Amino acid sequence: MLTPRLLVTHRAVLEAGTLRGAADVLGCSVSTVSHQLATLERETRQPLWERAGRGMRPTAAGLVLAEHTDRILTAIDNAESALDDTRHGRTGGLRVVTFHTAGESLLPSAIAALAQTLPGTSVHPVLDDTESALRRLRAGEVDAAIVVEFYPRGQEPADDLHRTHLFDDDYRILLHDSDPLARRRSIDVGDLSAANWIVTAGPDDYIRAATVNLCRRFGYSPRIVAEADGFSVTQGYVSVGLGVAIAPVLALGAIRRHVVVRKLKQPPPPRYIWLVTRPALAAQPPVLALTGALREASRRSW
């Protein structure tokens, strides 16, 4: 087998012309050089060198091998350099699957930050729900996933994936600016018992469930008058005074006219946002840099 070590010895003897000269260049003994040449000849099954006085002269086969040696060693050097660049995040791509609101308001800022710290690393985002994102991650189709989970930090499962808690995405209440409650800095859920409600459709219908559970804690069922297929549509309903709605902070990157956002005194449990990757990738510089950039972007969220 033509190993790099044997090819380096072959080239050294060719350049030095003697075993002693090659040994000095390589920093080893003459016997070591001689042994490696013998090994190379056994691997190629033909003589590569012949004695020429005190020196060594390549045979026709030795010259043929010499023609390829520099290209082979250069290719190996290039491969090692490329792998080193990838390992340190200087080049390469990072495939990230995310959910809609994170992809709209969180990931763009993180990608911009990554472009400054690791300019050679490109990020390729795709949208998907949590279940599909984790499936694609396990299948090797993506390198990382930003997902909403239903367990807080410290309660993550011990499975085949590596999870990093990014932040808790708290809920806010959206009201029309003409609503008397809009004058308050925070809203008591009990004061919304007579309100009309809008819910946003999504995976597992979690906004509807959160709305119903929140109101039932205060002894009433919400009167749901509309269902939107996205948080921007929900804001559209609220902006014309059709009702109130809850929405996570990540969904509030842009606020429509006449929509007022307030905190809830008794909010529902937040959405728990995690970055998930395979254990083999968790310590790679691009993944670590993405984690830091996402956390910083979340601190700048509305």
Image (tube, rainbow, N blue to C red):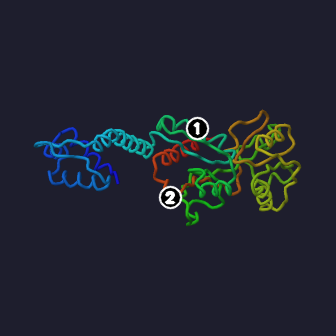
- Which mark, by number, is residue 147? none
Residue 119's spot in the image, x, y percent?
48, 35
Q: From mark 1 to mark 2, how far is it between C-alphas?
A: 25 Å
* 100 left or right of 286 in image: right
Please name the amino acid that badge 1 sits on. Answer: Ser
Crowd tier of the residue under label 2, counting other residues whose Cα lies within 10 Å: few below 14, some 14–19, many 20 or above: few
Crowd tier of the residue under label 1, counting other residues whose Cα lies within 10 Å: few below 14, some 14–19, many 20 or above: some
* 201 left or right of 66 in image: right
Quadrant in the rendering for residue 259 = top right
Judged from the image, the secondary structure of the residue bearing numbered disc 2 is: helix
Q: Nearer the viewer, residue 247 or 54?
A: 54
| Residue mark closest to the camera, 1 vs 2 | 2
Residue at the location (29% across, 51% down)? 46
Quadrant, the C terminus: top right
Judged from the image, the secondary structure of the residue bearing numbered disc 1 is: helix
Residue at the location (55% across, 57% down)? 163
Please identify the residue farthest to the bottom as the structure is shown. Answer: 158
The residue to which callout 1 is attached is 109
The residue to which callout 2 is attached is 279
Residue at the location (43% across, 46% down)? 87
Please name the amino acid that badge 2 sits on. Answer: Pro
Quadrant in the rendering for residue 77 = top left
* 45 left or right of 93 in image: left
Q: Nearer the viewer, residue 195 or 211?
A: 211
